[in-house]
Amino acid sequence: MAWHIDLPGGFVVSDDVGRLDLDRVHRYLAEQSYWAGGRERATVERTVANSLCLGLYAPDGTQMGFARAITDRAVYAHLADVFVGADYRGRGLGQAMVAALFDHPELRTVPCWTLSTRDAQGFYARFGFAAHPEPQTEMVWRRNRSD
Ligand SMILES: CC(C)(COP(=O)(O)OP(=O)(O)OC[C@H]1O[C@@H](n2cnc3c(N)ncnc32)[C@H](O)[C@@H]1OP(=O)(O)O)[C@@H](O)C(=O)NCCC(=O)NCCS
């Protein structure tokens, strides 16, 4: 059953996948985000199907934000594809949406969260995120199409 949180002003955060406006999510990620430029619509659909996603909805039901946890729902989660529509930023909705994800019934006991960000360290620091204490232990492999 879908889970949701009512926010002040009639905004709602919901995990109802059927409610997501995938055109909107795809458009933002592919055309406006700095991290997922050009991502195919089918790829967005696959990421959504295999993650725990939250939509942020305005009082009229329009989707204004999105956040995604890539997770085993037990010991680890990676926060990804977080955005709030430009017209709705700076009024606490992004924090409320991310807080809702951390408090989601399937995720609230997950002990380890990671994320990557170019410039939103300050936004996430208030939740307790900090630079990795042992960056030399982290590795990444970016697969090329030719690999
Ligand atoms: C980051 C984002 C989701 C924040 O959403 P929001 O609704 O504007 O955030 P809130 O209103 O809840 O919180 C705003 C607070 O976070 C801070 N903040 C917002 N974006 C920030 C950023 N990029 N870096 C540092 N702090 C940031 C603001 O300074 C503000 O602080 P204050 O409460 O002390 O004034 C939104 O700005 C966004 O969609 N940005 C573009 C996409 C993006 O960068 N996503 C994150 C990728 S990791």
Image: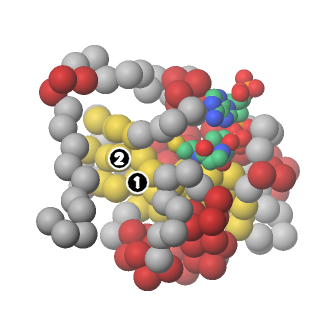
Instruction: Determine contact: label 2, label 1, CB under 8 Å.
Output: yes
- State the residue position of label 2: 78
Say which amino acid is labelled 2.
Answer: His
> From where the camera sits, is residue 1 visible?
no
x 45%, y 51%: residue = 80
Q: Disc 2 to disc 1, how far (Cα)?
A: 6 Å
Q: Residue at x 79, y 62 (%)?
A: 58
**Where residue 52 appears, x then y in whole percent?**
41, 61
Q: Helix, strand, or loop for circle 1? A: strand
Residue in the picture at 20% in, 32% down: 138
Query: In the rendered structure, which amino acid carries the disc numbered 1?
Result: Ala
**At numbered mark 2, what does the secondary structure look like: helix, strand or loop?**
strand
Estimate the x, y position of residue 123 in percent, counting from the top left: 60, 30
46 with respect to 55 (left or right): left
Residue placed under numbered mark 1 in the picture = 69
Residue under the image location 28 percent in, 35 percent down: 111
Q: Quadrant of the C terminus?
A: bottom left
For residue 27, which quarter of the picture? bottom right
Name the image quarter holding residue 132: top left
Q: In the image, is 130 to the left or to the right of 73?
A: right
Q: Is residue 119 visible?
A: yes
Q: Residues within 10 Å of mark 1 (few under 14, many from 20)?
A: many
Looking at the image, in which quadrant does ligand 1 appear?
top right
